[in-house]
Amino acid sequence: MKVPHSISGAVRTFSYFLSSGTHNMLEGVEYLDLYGKEPSAIEMTYAIFLNVLEYDESGKITNLKHAEKRATDYLRSYCQSDFEVNPEFEDWETQLY
């Protein structure tokens, strides 16, 4: 079975806005230098995005903005030590597979 088009589209779009520095949830956060220098931060951002993302039986995403928020909150907290993620991440959200 292949990944539903809604999932591949969501990952593609998230990737574009994240890697271009134009994701609206990361306005004012200096994170682009992490690419190539601290890849584990980018890796965890994607892991959280995909771990949190949910879809229904037809492949339609049901919580895109929530998944983006959790992932970008991680990246913001990584770059800005005074930013607190609320609620804190649960273990399943940060699991690397």
Image: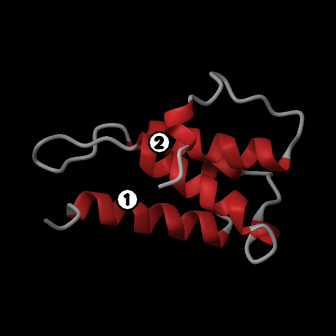
Res 23 seen here: no
Write down the quadrant of residue 86 in the picture: top right
Helix, strand or loop status at disc 2: helix
Residue 51 lies, in percent from the top left, at 44, 45
Mark number displayed over residue 32: none
Please tell me which residue is depicted at 72% across the width and 51% down the height of the picture.
27
Please tell me which residue is depicted at 47% across the width and 55% down the height of the picture.
97
Mark 1: amino acid: Ala
Left or right: residue 54 versus residue 80 is left
Q: Which residue is mark 1?
A: 10
Left or right: residue 70 versus residue 30 is left
Q: Which residue is mark 2?
A: 67
Please tell me which residue is depicted at 56% across the width and 64% down the height of the picture.
17
Residue 62 higher or lower than 32, as above or below: above
Disc 2 versus disc 1: distance between alpha carbons?
10 Å
Front residue of 64/52: it is 52
Mark 2: amino acid: Ala
Near mark 2 (Cα within 10 A), the count class, few <14, some 14-19 or many ≥20, is: many
Residue 22 lies, in percent from the top left, at 64, 63
Please tell me which residue is depicted at 62% across the width and 54% down the height of the picture.
44
Count of residue discs? 2
Give the mark nearest the N terminus, 2 or 1: 1
Res 95 seen here: yes
Contact? badges 2 and 1 (CB < 8 Å)? yes
